[in-house]
Amino acid sequence: MIFIIGSILIIILILITGLILRKRTYDEVDRQENWKVNIMNRNVAGQLARIKELNLSGETQEKFETWKEKWETIVTQDLASVEEALFEAEDAADRYRFPTARKVIQRTDAILEAVEKDIDQILLELDQLMDTEKQNRKDVEQMEPRIKELQKHMLQNRYQYGKADALYEKELDKLEEKIATYYELVADGNYLEAKELVEQAKDELTTIDHAIEEFPALYKMCKDTLPAEFSQLLAGIQEMGEAGYPINHFDFKNEITKYQQHLDDGLKALEKGDLTPVKEMMNEAEERIKELYDLLEKEALAKNYVDSHIPSYRTALEEIAATFQETMLEVDHLKQNYYLTDQDMEQYMAIEKAIEHLELQLVKMNTTLEQKKSTYTDLRKNLENDWNELKQIKQNHIEFKEKLNSLRHDEIEAKEKLTTMRQDIQDTYRKVEKSNIPGVPKHIINLMGEAQEKNEAVLQALEEQPLDMAHVQNTLTEAQTLINHLMEQTDFMLNQAFLTEQVIQYANRYRSRYPLLATKLNEAEQLFRKYDYELALEEAAKAVEEVEPGALKRIEKMQTIG
């Protein structure tokens, strides 16, 4: 029973599946039928009829025949085969031969897609041809009046073009011939070939139009304006030469002659219609004219500068030379009493050589001016450099003079410091004598001896002839450093000795009660009498601190207040 029910269910399932697949096949057939109908309704034949607006001959006739033939093939063959295939697909579906139906539908889709592409290509080419004809006609309608205008312009303004008038008239005539050829091609139905011709004519007309517009100004500039400017420039150069300017060094005349030749060549190029290199040449010529005028103006300003500044420069150089002569005498005198360092002598000789160099330069400059061997522009540059060098020489001379003056000043100052240091040593001796200490430690005595020796060394350095102030300064610094150290050590020693006495006196109040303290105080006193004040203070301070902590600070405070 179960087997029978299962079999029935399977049969029902198969029937349902078959019905669904057949329905899908019918839907696909309907879709392709609608697609075929839409293709038929695209009215391709009506679109092709638009071509009758054109001259149906030549390549247009060929294209029309090709498109017509392709459309007829689509209608009579491709779409007919689609119709048969649709019947075949339905028949296969009715017989439940779904794989066969699927293959037929796929084949039909491919045919319909190919047909769509062919139709799209036909209509695209048709639109392009129609647009080409329309655009050609529009372009020609715009070119024809412009050609007439240019021909009229050339006729009325022939004098502005020199020998190039025939060239441009010939070019305009060629354009008219191309327009005539265009009409012939259109009459023969060769619209695409006509398009190429129109595009070529448009480019040529644009070029000729610009050339005709630019030519008069270029021609006038090349024939009249620039030659006149160069002639005027030559006249100015000649006037400056007659006025005494060494203008020949610039070689302007040869350069201007070359530009004049370039202008003659430019006229010939213009007459041949070659405008671009001529424009570049004239731009260069105009720029160079401005540069030449700038150079001439610069030369005139330089002459004025040289003429007005050379006298003052000569006076300034003579003054520094005379002042340096005095310095030379002073150096000769100072060298008898003072030792001048190698650095000082190098600076001295450098100033001397620099002045001699500027004097030689001035002689050369005067010779150059008299013989006109150089331009004023170069002379001004040299004069400005020499002025700057002269200013530096003056500054170097002032610094050198200050060094010479400092020799005497340093000598006096060194002697004053020596006197001060001697007084410091004597004051130190007196301070020690008044202190009533048992004696002076050996290291203080040694420092005093060394200080005396350093002072003697300074005195000997000051008495040397010639006097070497660098050596004096070094010796003086060493002596001052040692004396300062002596004074510091002496004050420290005296303070320790006095504090030791204060601590012992303070501790005496505990001497009878603390035998150990008494013993340590006796040791401190022995050290004090041996001039070892530092160790004596240390022993005494330890002893009293053991009995009365903080006593040393109180004693120091009382000493400070006192």
Image (cartoon, grey):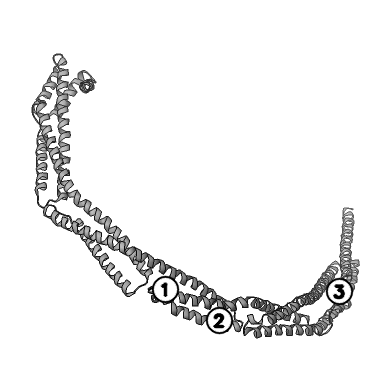
Q: Residue at x 14, y 51 (%)?
A: 468
Q: Which residue is mark 2?
A: 266
Do callouts 1 and 3 mark residues in contact (Cβ within 8 Å)?
A: no
* Mark 3 residue type: Gln
Q: Is residue 280 above or below residue 340?
A: below
Question: x%, y% of residue 127?
Answer: 80, 74
* Mark 1 residue type: Met
Observer-nearest of 377 and 444:
377
User: Element type at marker 3?
Assistant: helix
* Upstream in sequence: badge 2 or badge 1: 1
Question: x%, y% of residue 96?
Answer: 88, 66
How packed is label 1: few (under 14 Cα within 10 Å), some, or many (20 or more)?
Answer: some
Q: Nearer the viewer, mark 3 or mark 2?
A: 2
Distance from disc 3 to disc 2, alpha carbons, whole Å, reads 58 Å
Q: Which residue is mark 1?
A: 240
Q: Which residue is mark 3?
A: 47
Q: Is residue 283 left or right of residue 558?
A: right
User: Element type at marker 1?
Assistant: helix
Q: Nearer the viewer, mark 2 or mark 1?
A: 1
Q: Is residue 39 above or below residue 64?
A: above
**Residue 371 figure quarter:** bottom left
Looking at the image, can residue 408 be seen? yes
Question: x%, y% of residue 85?
Answer: 88, 72
